[in-house]
Amino acid sequence: MNAGMRRFAVMLGVFVLAFLAVFVFRKAQGGGGLLDLLKFGSRDRSQTFVPESYTLSRKPALSPGEVEYLAALDQEFARLTAAVVPSVVSLHTEGVRRNFMQDWFGRVWVDEGYPVRGIGSGVIVSKEGHVVTNEHVTNGKSKISVTMHDGKTYPAVVIGEDRALDIAVIRIKADREFQPLKFGDSARVRQGQQALAIGNPFGLGETVTRGIISAKERTISDRQRDLFQTDAAINPGNSGGPLVNIFGEIIGINVAIYSPDTEDQGFVGIGFSIPANDVREVFEQILAKGRATRGWLGVRCYDWNPLVREKVGWYKEGGVYIVDVVAGSPAQAAGLQADDVVIRYNGKQVESRVQFFHEIQRTPVAREVDLAVWRGGKEVGLTATVIDAEDSERLTSRSGSVERNAEENRIIEAIGITVQELTLLQRTRGGSGVLITAVAPESQAARRGLRPGDLVVEVNNARIEHPADFYARLIASATAQQTSIVVQRGRQTYRVRPFDRVPRIDNRE
């Protein structure tokens, strides 16, 4: 027998021994015979299934009498939900997003754009079908449809928007009467109170979540202040939906969530809502004038730094430093001056620049306010009359064009940016910085992709509010070092590649 045959015989013997060992083991365990083993576990279909017997519990772990208060609370929340849900709507929006491009000659081109769709929520606040939602839900959308609780869908039209507060008012186009919810008094809301958030998260449709008021007066940006924080689940699509109290009153409009994951934002237990009193005020202004109104005094302020404190002699907490006063403004008429420190506004302590402007904007137009000012080591009392920010644009139309020498003009031309101040309407809608109106071809700005319509918000990490600030910092920096600026385009903010140093004319290097 050759070697190959011997190996085959050995392998066959091993297989037979293994097979017999399994057979003996199964017999010892009460298994089937050899024929059953050869079937490799196939089931005998002739066998009849024997039903299993079972006994279910016929009573709950606790009787209704033992959880009387919990049962009543459960029924109350169910009734509350049934009462408010019919007034909450789902929004579906459509629009076209266009890209602005600029060629080497400074000409601006607009592409054909591409369609964009969005979702959101809203709440009916009038029998005529007025709906309050977020401005970021409706902004730039040409078509808005509203889906009701009963499944019916209607078109809607935008009545007005307020970007500063992120509130929009739309009206449902339908010949019927609607069931509105009442605005509650958000000033009476207390931390720890129950709240329901209702909306259309992720486009799933009508959804109710419950939580408490976790905190009040939260700030998430210069524009979004004094918000309610809640742990009622809020997700993308809930924007514009109501936060209601146990009486079914609107105490807030859901606006944002906190999420540590910027790539996959979802609810982590922290949501924010705009207080109902602010929403109602803006709602009434929009229906009366088509826009929100903001108070205005006509001052420009800087945040504190050691040099300014040393200059004016103010070392206490709070207060706001006045850089200059607009000519012909209410502030000038009241006697406010550059280098003053406003320490109280209408009897309320001034804590920061942001809070100071927030208080001014919320002041009703034509109202007189008392100002407590620190000037030359003494406290001075002044009275000013607030005016409408919209009416003040003629006082703030400066473009920053001042007398400059040839060297300064050469530096500005080398950088290649022309800017102007934002209008008050742009500022009250959340804009900041200065607006680029022109970019010179072949300039440093053109090579870095800057274009008209961009907002310059910082120069060398310093905030910019006026064209004069921009040009002064640019000229001072450009001949000595690389100059860094931060630009806002749409809702995106980014830092531009630093401008190269501009040599002086007499530079012999």
Image: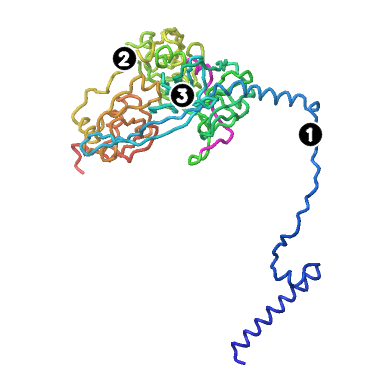
Q: Which residues are magenta?
A: 265-281
Residue at the front extreme? 46
486 or 163, which lies in front?
Answer: 163
- SS for tag 1? loop
* Residue assigned mark 3: 154
416 or 437, which lies in front?
Answer: 437
Q: Quadrant of the C terminus?
A: top left
Q: Is residue 343 left or right of residue 461?
A: right
Does the stretch in magenta take in 273? yes
Q: Residue at x 62, y 85 (%)?
A: 7
Disc 2 to disc 1, how far (Cα)? 73 Å
Name which residue type carries label 3.
Tyr
Residue at the bottom extreme? 1
Disc 3 to disc 2, how far (Cα)? 43 Å
- The quarter of the displayed image where residue 456 is located: top left
- The quarter of the displayed image where residue 162 is located: top left
Q: Residue at x 36, y 8 (%)?
A: 333
